[in-house]
């Protein structure tokens, strides 16, 4: 159903393209909380990039050792006026800055969903999670799992790739 759909993200702005209707749509803020391509990820999950650094206050809650790694539990509390969806977040972060778990809480402090990262290994010359799973708190049997088979990173890409016209017709 979603084959051929594409998403373009520049900064905090997002567009989506559906080749069946040959349209590119800029997602308004009201749609950022909606499901991304029917998954348990939201458009906001994909667009937030540096929001975790800019829009939240960070509090170190705990540090422990797991499987030879130092793991930090960090609570992220939104700054006043920050354009964020969550009441707060909790993140388990390894010393090498790899997030192994992120929990998302609503304004009442109720857990909504959890992101799990697994099979951390070299991919494309970088150490990254090969498997990422987003699990709904109220329906743990309902989840979206993303598995990377291979990744390729490039030092630079032509600016034309990050345009609405390229999103509409990537063969140009």
Image (cartoon, rainbow, N blue to C red):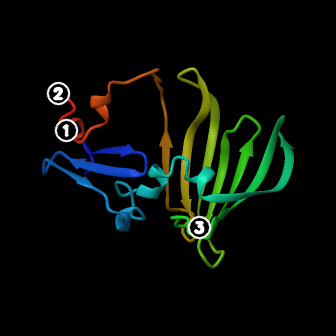
91 lies left or right of 54:
right
Q: Which of 29/94 is in front?
A: 29
Please report the residue visible at 63 percent of the width from the left and 65 percent of the height from the top: 79
Please report the residue visible at 48 percent of the width from the left and 43 percent of the height from the top: 146
Badge 2: residue crowd in 10 Å (few <14, some 14–19, many ≥20): few
Q: Position of residue 36 (x, y in %)?
A: 38, 55
Residue 137: mark in rendering: 3
- Most distant residue in the left direction: 21
Please report the residue visible at 38 percent of the width from the left and 44 percent of the height from the top: 10
Q: What's the distance in space between the residues labelled 3 and 2, CA to CA?
A: 43 Å
Please report the residue visible at 63 percent of the width from the left and 36 percent of the height from the top: 119
Dividing the picture into quadrants, the one containing residue 107 is bottom right
Query: Is residue 49 placed above or below 171 in the rendered structure?
Result: below
Q: Secondary structure at mark 2?
A: loop
The residue singled out by tag 2 in the image is 172
| Contact flag, marks 1 and 2 (Cβ < 8 Å) | yes
148 lies left or right of 162:
right
| Contact flag, marks 3 and 2 (Cβ < 8 Å) | no
Query: Is residue 97 placed above or below 75 in the rendered structure?
Result: above
Q: Position of residue 27 (x, y in %)?
A: 31, 58
Q: What's the distance in space between the residues labelled 3 and 1, CA to CA?
A: 38 Å
- Most distant residue in the front direction: 81
The residue singled out by tag 1 in the image is 165
Q: Position of residue 145 (x, y in %)?
A: 50, 48
Query: Is residue 163 placed above or below 35 in the rendered structure?
Result: above
Badge 3: residue crowd in 10 Å (few <14, some 14–19, many ≥20): some
Dividing the picture into quadrants, the one containing residue 86 is bottom right
Give the mark nearest the N terminus, 1 or 2: 1
């Amino acid at each position: 159903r979603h084959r051929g759909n594409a998403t373009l993200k520049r900064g905090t702005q997002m567009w989506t393209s559906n080749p069946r209707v040959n349209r590119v749509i800029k997602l308004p803020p009201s749609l950022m909380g909606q499901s991304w391509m029917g998954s348990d990820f939201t458009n906001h999950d994909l667009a937030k990039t540096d929001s975790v650094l800019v829009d939240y206050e960070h509090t170190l809650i705990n540090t422990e050792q797991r499987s030879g790694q130092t793991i930090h539990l960090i609570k992220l509390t939104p700054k006043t006026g920050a354009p964020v969806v969550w009441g707060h977040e909790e993140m388990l972060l390894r010393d090498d800055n790899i997030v192994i778990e992120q929990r998302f809480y609503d304004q009442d402090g109720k857990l909504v969903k959890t992101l799990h990262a697994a099979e951390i290994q070299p991919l494309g010359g970088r150490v990254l999670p090969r498997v990422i799973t987003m699990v709904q708190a109220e329906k743990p049997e309902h989840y979206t799992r993303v598995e990377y088979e291979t990744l390729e990173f490039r030092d630079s890409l032509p600016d034309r790739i990050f345009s609405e016209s390229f999103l509409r017709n990537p063969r140009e």
